[in-house]
Structure formats: structure tokens, C-alpha cells
Amino acid sequence: MIFGIYKNNQAKLTRLCSAFGFGIIAAIGCLLLYRKLEGADFGLWVSTMVPVGVFAGIALLIFWLSNKPSIADFLIAAEGEIKKVSWSSRKEIAVSTFIVIVLVVIMATLLGVADLSFKLFFTEIVGI
């Protein structure tokens, strides 16, 4: 049962999304490998079949890892914890973002005034 699905009804979306994300990374890597092999002029067969084989191997590895009991149990537990999170409302996020932007602008203004004050003090008054 190397390629069996472990607890197939639990954390299905989490496993699929994780596998899809790793699959995208693998696909980009295989595309870069294809471009390197194509530039090295190994021939069409080698430059296409080597990345396809590498991608197939990585896809099997991702499938095996996502159904390995320890990793699958971790993903099941992670999905359970995410369901327990109390997410902020859209209004709370908008207000918090506005407060952060206003405070950043105020701090930038205060630091700019302090910088200009020190520049004026050291150039005009002290004469350095």
C-alpha cells in the first residue's frame, strides 16, 4: 500500500492545495531544466523527456508524501486548527489597516522633521 490514500475523507482540500503548490514549484523547476537542456543542444528527445520524467517522479513523491501517515495527520490537525480560528471581519481589517497607514505617515513626518532639524543644527549652527 505504498500509493494508497490515507484517511481519504479528512483534510482533502488541504492535501490537494499543498500538493498543487508543490506541483507548481516542480513544474517551474522542470521548465527551467527543459530550457537548460534545450540550450545545451542535447536533442529534442532528451530535452523533453528528462524534465517530463523528473516531473513524474516528483509527482509520485508528492502523492506518496501527502498520504504518508505522519504528514497526513499533521495536515489533518492543521486544517482542524484553521477551522477554530476566529477571523476578523472586513470592517475590522479595513479600520486596522487605515490606523496603521496613518501612524506610518505620522512617524515618517516626525522622523523627517527630526532629520531636517538635526541637519539644520549641524550645518548652520555648529558649522560642521
Image (tube, rainbow, N blue to C red):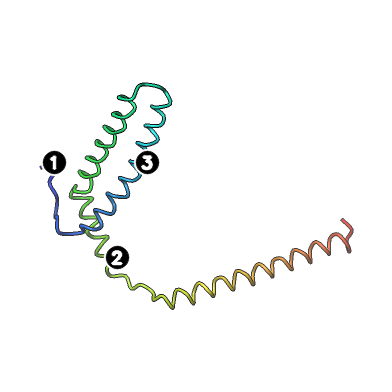
Q: Is residue 21 above or below residue 41?
A: below
Position of residue 64 measured from the top left corner of the image (x, y, whole percent):
20, 43
**Residue at disc 3, secondary structure:** helix
Position of residue 68 measured from the top left corner of the image (x, y, whole percent):
19, 47
Q: Is residue 39 above or below residue 103?
A: above
The residue shown at (53%, 74%) is: 98
Q: Which mark is residue 82?
A: 2
The residue carrying pointer 3 sits among few (fewer than 14), some (14 to 19) or many (20 or more) residues within 10 Å by Cα, namely: few
Residue 3, quarter of picture:
top left
Mark closer to the observer (3, 2):
3
Label 1 with label 2: CB-CB less than 8 Å:
no
State the CA–CA distance, disc 1 to disc 2: 29 Å
Q: Earlier in the sequence, mark 3 or mark 2?
A: 3
The residue shown at (45%, 73%) is: 93
Q: Closer to the camera, 85 or 20?
A: 20
Q: Is residue 58 above or below residue 95?
A: above
The residue shown at (25%, 44%) is: 62
Specify the farthest residue to the front: 44
Label 3, on which residue? 28
Label 3 with label 2: CB-CB less than 8 Å:
no
Position of residue 29 measured from the top left corner of the image (x, y, whole percent):
37, 38
Q: Give the amino acid at mark 3.
A: Ile
Q: Give the amino acid at mark 1.
A: Ile
**Residue at disc 1, secondary structure:** loop
Mark closer to the observer (3, 1):
3
Label 1, on which residue? 2
